[in-house]
Image: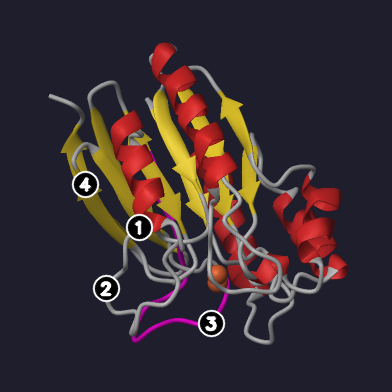
Amino acid sequence: MVLIAHISDLHVGAPNFKEDILLEAIRQINELKPDATVITGDLTDNGYYLEFLQAAEYLSDLRGPHIFVPGNHDARHVGNETFEDVFRYRKGTFVMDDLTIIGLDSSEPDLDYGKIGRSQQIWMEEELERASERGHFRVIALHHHIIPVPKTGRERNVLADAGDILYSIIRKGADLVISGHKHVPHVWRVEDTFFVTAGTVSSLKLRGKDINSYNTYYITEDSIRIVLNQVQGERIELASHSLRE
Ligand SMILES: [Fe+2]
Ligand SMILES: [Fe+2]
């Protein structure tokens, strides 16, 4: 079995950033000993260099491999450049035993909307093909959601090229697509692909009675279980399905 932990939207540097909740989430994740932890953007609130350093310091407490992609907040104030200084890359492919995680950069400097763009789309398709040849479980990680999420008001922030990216992902057969951005945990299934958004792990920009959370994915050869972990609450199963019967 493979276990992936997924945290998003830390918003380090925001007035409503809760350090104690982030540290508690990291402690819980370390206890779970995931095979990888993926952080899908908005690590910082303003993209300031010092915020990146602070975020990197918190996340250095995570044991095991962890993978980052930037969010729209990380692309503010030239954060799109300094992100790479601190986290070494903005997109990349991470290959583990039976698992390939493809991290995409959906951010645009100083803009809130997201876009993958044609060249990154082609690269993603090639990486998905390679992962399929290896027989791997294929994960795509990006900040912006591709499919609108319920209870988030007027939709303005799906990827500008959501239709094209959705088409590529379905056609090339990704198994799991994980995002953040809306601070609302949700699962959609389109054909054989699960699209999962995470809540915010440590910002108080929450909707209704939501509380801070992160997701975990338990993957076997023929099944996936998607769990919402409230940092100061319960563990709630969001979905459980057989894969590609
Ligand atoms: Fe966010
Ligand atoms: Fe965001």
In the image, which disc is placed on residue 204?
Answer: 3
Task: Name above or below for residue 124 compared with residue 29.
Answer: above
* Three-letter amino acid code at the position of disc 3: Leu
Asked if the beta carbon under badge 2 is closer than 8 A to the nearest atom of ligand 1, the reply is no
Residue 225 to residue 210: above or below: above
Q: Earlier in the sequence, mark 1 or mark 2?
A: 2
The residue singled out by tag 2 in the image is 150
Q: Label 4 sits on what residue type?
A: Val
For the point 33% across and 34% down, the residue is 175
Q: Which residues are magenta?
A: 202-217
Identity of the residue furthest to the top in this view: 134
Instruction: For marks 2 and 4, give the one nearer the viewer.
Output: 4
Q: Position of residue 71 (x, y in %)?
A: 61, 62
Which residue, given by chain and number where applicable, does mark 4 sit on? 190
How crowded pointer 2 is (Cα within 10 Å; few <14, some 14-19, many 20+) is rated as few
Q: Which mark is residue 228?
A: 1
Closer to the eye: label 3 or 4: 4
Q: Find numbered disc 1 in the image and state the secondary structure of the residue it sits on.
A: strand
Report the Cα–Cα distance between label 2 and label 4: 16 Å
The answer to whether residue 21 is visible is: yes
Q: Main secondary structure of the magenta part?
A: loop
Q: In front here: 36 or 151?
A: 151
Category of crowding for the residue at label 3, using alpha-carbon neighbours closer than 10 angstroms: few (below 14), some (14–19), many (at least 20): some
Q: CA distance from mark 3 to mark 2?
A: 19 Å
Q: Is residue 38 above or below residue 173?
A: below
Residue 90 rendering spot, x and y as whole percentages: 70, 47
Q: Quadrant of residue 245?
A: top left
Q: Is residue 189 magenta?
A: no
- Secondary structure beneath dot 4 equals strand
